Image: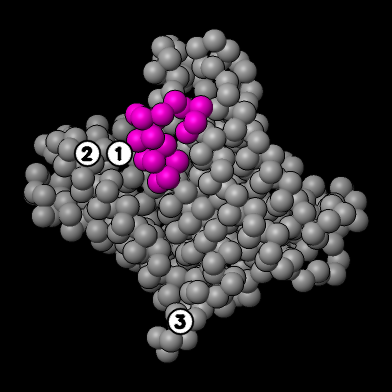
Amino acid sequence: MTHKIFSKIVSRKMVVSLIMGFSCGVPLLLTISVLQAWMKQEGVDLATIGMFSLVGLPYTLKFLWAPIFDRFTLPFLGRRKGWLLVSQMLLILSIALLGLTSPSKAPWLVAFTAFLVTFFSASQDIIVDAYRREDLNDEELGLGSSMYIYGYRAGMLLASGGGLILADHIPFSMVYLIMAASLLPAVAAVVFTPEPAVVDGQPATIYEAVVEPLKEYFARDGAVLILLFILFYKIGDTMASAMTTPFYLDIGFTKTEIGTVVKVFGFWATLGGTFAGGVLMLKLGINRSLWMFGILQALSTACFAWLAMVGHSIPLLSGVIAFENISSGMGTAAYIAFMASMTNRRFTATQYALLSSLMGIPRVIASAPTGFIVEHIRWTGFFIFCTLIAIPGIIFPFYISSKK
């Protein structure tokens, strides 16, 4: 059994999922933390730096142009690989061009180029998600999603941690050129990996590409229930995460302790949980995994209430962070695999883009009132509240399973 699992992990499909995840993870922070550090270094005012967060809009609006990738096929490499190669080449070019701009001398040119980076990055995300869904069968989706997240996290770490460390020794322009070059292995993966099998019934017009995915989805039994599940599955985890840094500081942890335990140790715990989730899904299936990992997520949130009552304790903080990040990593792997399994192969790009955009709503809306809640019920009550609000996400998988 161990040999069989290992052979799946090192298979062509899983390696490609890993590399494509890396390619999607690198660009994200190049227009956020790395660009902010560059602008700060060049003396750009804080108001302008804050406004630059708007260049990330393509990540939340990507469903608007996703139907193009379902409707049209380029005359080379195939329906998915052709668009993927084009988006990657344009992404590499835009990252390199961003490195040649000057935040202090031409901030609007920087904003425009950064917007190009996020647009081509979001486009790559759409096509990679569609490719992964069509390349993997239902049994492989769990492990494939885990490998994708692994690569994504590694790409983010290279761009943020690696990029900022490099910037202490070389100009930011060189940092961006290096980050652009780091995407070349993904280009090679696209060229040499096979195109997924063509499915019948692909949209023949833009109207069909936009309307048919919605009609097909809402014609399913339990369609609204699935949307509610996507909204609620990680809401407790998301609300708790929005206030963890103020919480750590409030109960007496230093910034060094937070950086060492929460960020560095927590990063590896998340990767461990993501990998464990992928392997367990091979045995349990996606629906059973959602239920089990949802329970673990809720329990890990409850542990923060325990930490709030105990106060400053490095051993307890380490244990809580390990449990929370492992369970969150497992839940995220199952969550992404589930969304992929819900898409129709005729409209993979459009339906997955819609579902993943929906996934981001709790991060913005549900997190907004968290500070207000803490002020009224304090930290222990807040984390208990986050635990209770996670219960619908644990119950939904039972009903969804009965509808499938």
Q: Give how far apart the Cα atoms at labels 3 and 2 are.
A: 40 Å
**Residue at image point 11% right, 37% down:** 252
Residue 343's spot in the image, x, y percent?
Answer: 67, 63
Residue closest to the far bottom:
1
Q: Give how far apart the Cα atoms at labels 3 and 1 are.
A: 38 Å
- Mark nearer the viewer, 3 or 1: 3
- The residue to which callout 3 is attached is 5
Q: Give how far apart the Cα atoms at labels 1 and 2 are.
A: 6 Å
**Residue at image point 42% right, 45% down:** 158
- The residue to which callout 2 is attached is 247
Do the CB atoms of the residues marked 3 and 1 lie less than 8 Å apart?
Answer: no
Who comes first in sequence, dot 3 or dot 2? 3
Foreground pick, 110 / 342? 110
Residue 226 marker: none
- Mark nearer the viewer, 3 or 2: 3
Q: Is residue 344 left or right of residue 286?
A: right
Q: Which amino acid does label 3 sit on?
A: Ile
Q: Mostly what secondary structure, the magenta segment?
A: helix
Say which element carries label 1: loop
Mark 1 nearby-residue class (10 Å; few <14, some 14–19, many ≥20) = some
| On screen, residue 401 above or below 232 | below
Q: Quarter of the image for the N terminus: give it.
A: bottom left
Residue 390's spot in the image, x, y percent?
Answer: 38, 56
Residue closest to the far right:
204
Q: Quarter of the image for the C terminus: give it.
A: bottom right
- The residue to which callout 1 is attached is 243
Do the CB atoms of the residues marked 1 and 2 lie less than 8 Å apart?
Answer: yes
Q: Is residue 278 left or right of residue 326?
A: right
Q: Which contiguous range is marked in magenta?
A: 157-175
Say which element carries label 2: helix
Residue 373's spot in the image, x, y percent?
Answer: 30, 36
Say which element carries label 3: helix
